[in-house]
Image: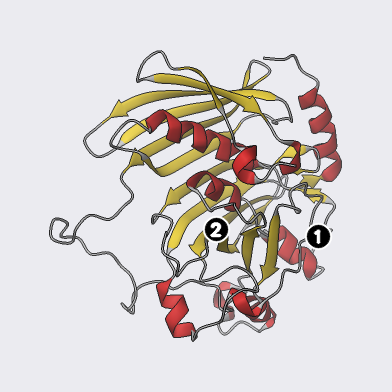
Amino acid sequence: MAPLSKAIALRSVSSSDEVTSVYAGIVDPDWNVASIPNGGYVLALVVEASIRHQASTPLRDPIHVTAHFLRTTAVAEFEIHVRTLRTGKGFTNLVADFKQQNEVKLTTHFIFGVLSPTSPLTEPLPTLAPPSRYARRIPLLTHPSRLTNTGWSRRPLGYMTHIALVEDPMVQEHNQLPSIDDSNGKELEWAAWIELTVQSERITTPSLAFLVDTFNNLPELLAQRNYGNIKAGSQWFPTLTLTIEFKFPIPTSDEYAKRTVGIHARGRYINNPQGRHETTVEVWSAPSNIGEGQGQPADVWRDKQVCLAVSSQMALVVPMAVNRRKGECAAGGPKL
């Protein structure tokens, strides 16, 4: 039962030059949704490989990644092939492929650069941040110190022993309120504090790839309201595409939690066939771990938090039996 930092461990297989490198490992079974590895966890492996590929260069920070999930991944050996497409003055473009059973299961395109802000003396463009009234504040409204871990039973998730989770009750209450303006429909949202339970764990850039894929989506929020024919816990939501823009560096100050983040998710559309739907996710820093420390006035702690990443994904709604069947098929192929 490996925590996330150990579950994304890789070994270098080859690095013949500065352009290409290959990393290998074994998918950890703890990080499954039923029989299939969580898509964000698999992407975290690729992010880790790409960061290692870029480690000796000045452009070491992932700025953006686009991932296409081509085939079902499995709890099995894998290789990640990373290749530099272009290196410029401010950005580097990479492609990285996640391979199992001699097939590309996931393909990604990265933009690397420098995430840390430059000096305002050398950078004339402003950063939009509090106290500006135009700056977005963290959408979670309840300080995590005031809450206790409630767990999460929405799906058969193998990694629930590795994370603590509590939904924001004020956001839940907001979902129950009538819409002020019905002209655009009632938008449902989901927000929670998520904590890595092992004391030595830390929020890292690869872990953000997993965290952006950890939420309740629009079909599940509708199922909670008995809307349509969606049944909570009986569906699987395979991801087809996922993008992440990394916004700010992960804070290192003691004012911020080291292993907890805030997650906010919302979706607006579900389309047939196959229940195709989109979800936009924001990952924010946290002022404390869940149930620890002391709360502060909202206008104090909310102004201090920074958005670490913004993600958008497209996924489907299919029966959970498809997950089981595909998991068996994916695990039965030839070895690398």
Q: Secondary structure at mark 2?
A: strand
Q: Amino acid at mark 2?
A: Val
Circle number at residue 153: 1
Would you place residue 187 above or below residue 43 in this image?
A: below
Q: Residue at x 22, y 54 (%)?
A: 118
Would you place residue 144 above or below residue 310 in this image?
A: below
Q: Residue at x 67, y 58 (%)?
A: 217
Q: Nearer the viewer, residue 207 or 173?
A: 207
Q: Position of residue 180 (x, y in %)?
A: 57, 85
Residue lying furthest left: 121
Q: Position of residue 252 (x, y in %)?
A: 42, 59
Q: Residue at x 35, y 38 (%)?
A: 60
Q: Nearer the viewer, residue 311 or 305?
A: 305
In the picture, residue 69 is in which quadrant? top right
Q: Which residue is mark 2?
A: 281
In the picture, residue 90 is in which quadrant? top left
Q: Is residue 40 visible?
A: no
Q: Nearer the viewer, mark 1 or mark 2?
A: 1
In the picture, residue 170 is in which quadrant? bottom right
Q: Amino acid at mark 1?
A: Ser
Q: Residues within 10 Å of mark 2 (few under 14, many from 20)?
A: many
Q: Nearer the viewer, residue 69 or 56?
A: 56
Q: Residue at x 78, y 46 (%)?
A: 158
Q: Is residue 331 left or right of residue 214?
A: right
Q: Position of residue 310 (x, y in %)?
A: 48, 55
Q: Position of residue 46 (x, y in %)?
A: 53, 34
